[in-house]
Image (cartoon, grey):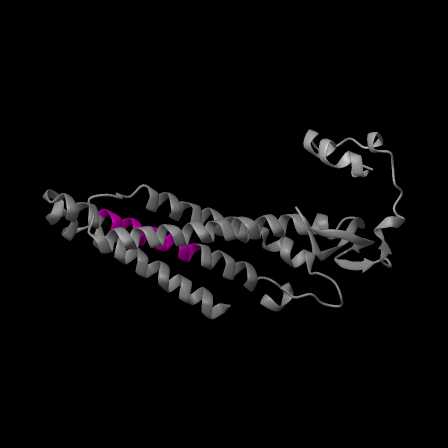
Amino acid sequence: IADAAAAFGAARLSFADARAEAASAPGLIAGGVPVLRRTFHVAAALADAGGHAAGAGLAIAGGIERLPGGVEALAPAGGALPIEAFASLAGSLEEARLEVARAVRVIRSSPDSILPGQVRDARRQALEGVEEVEHLFGSAEAFARALPGFAGGAEPRRYLFIAENPAEQRGTGGLWGAYAIVRVDAGRFSFSSFRPIQNLRNLPPDAVAPPNPDYRRNYDQWGGAG
């Protein structure tokens, strides 16, 4: 992790130098030529975005470095998820997401036309890359913030766990065949024994509100809502 942080720090400095170079003398010389002027603007934007992406890497590396035991603190231990370790990373993940979001905005604001083919392709590839990473960090941050509640960090939680038969496909997966109750307490999961789905109480269709009119029309005749 320390090596990663050092590498991201060096990358950020290199991107800063590249941005300054693209925005200085060569760009001024090319000021009267639209294609060259726009090329230097794109080069400066990509370097600026690279600096923000490197800053995101620094934020993640720093967050992991502060964990007791480093990256190994994120692995399950003693049969439990390390919910406190993930929760403590939420701030670093948010910082990383915001840095990459800035990178996305910088590239989007750069010229996207009247460019040489190689420059246009580089801009497109860079934008696709940072957009993907922005989505990744957004998901990771949401996971880190939601995990303690989901995994029983404050109090035990109970969930219905359905086993589906993939040989009989339905819209959300396979036909429900069995179920269990999952209890999660401080990151530890325990399952009840599995029982056939037919053991569940079968209610009259009108006793349960349908999720939508189509469901009632298609499945109430088979007792689906019950």
At x 87%, y 49%, the residue is 198
State whether the magenta stretch is mostly helix, strand or loop. helix
Across the whole image, how many numbered discs are drawn on residues? 0
Look at the image and say whether residue 52 sits in the magenta stretch.
yes
Is 145 left or right of 161, judged from the image as shown?
left
Quarter occupied by the C terminus: top right
Q: Residue furthest front?
A: 221
Q: Is residue 152 visible?
A: no
Q: Residue furthest bottom?
A: 3
Q: Above or below — where is 1 with respect to 199? A: below
At x 34%, y 43%, the residue is 108
At x 78%, y 59%, the residue is 189
At x 22%, y 53%, the residue is 117
Task: Find residue 129 and report its image quarter.
Answer: bottom left
Q: Position of residue 102 (x, y in %)?
A: 40, 45
Q: Is residue 119 visible?
A: yes
Task: Find residue 192 and report its image quarter.
Answer: bottom right
Q: Position of residue 191 (x, y in %)?
A: 82, 58
The residue range painted magenta reads 41-55
Q: Nearer the viewer, residue 219 or 33?
A: 219
Task: Find residue 68 and report its image quarter.
Answer: bottom right
Q: Position of residue 180 (x, y in %)?
A: 82, 54
Q: Nearer the viewer, residue 127 or 44?
A: 127
Is 195 left or right of 45, judged from the image as shown?
right
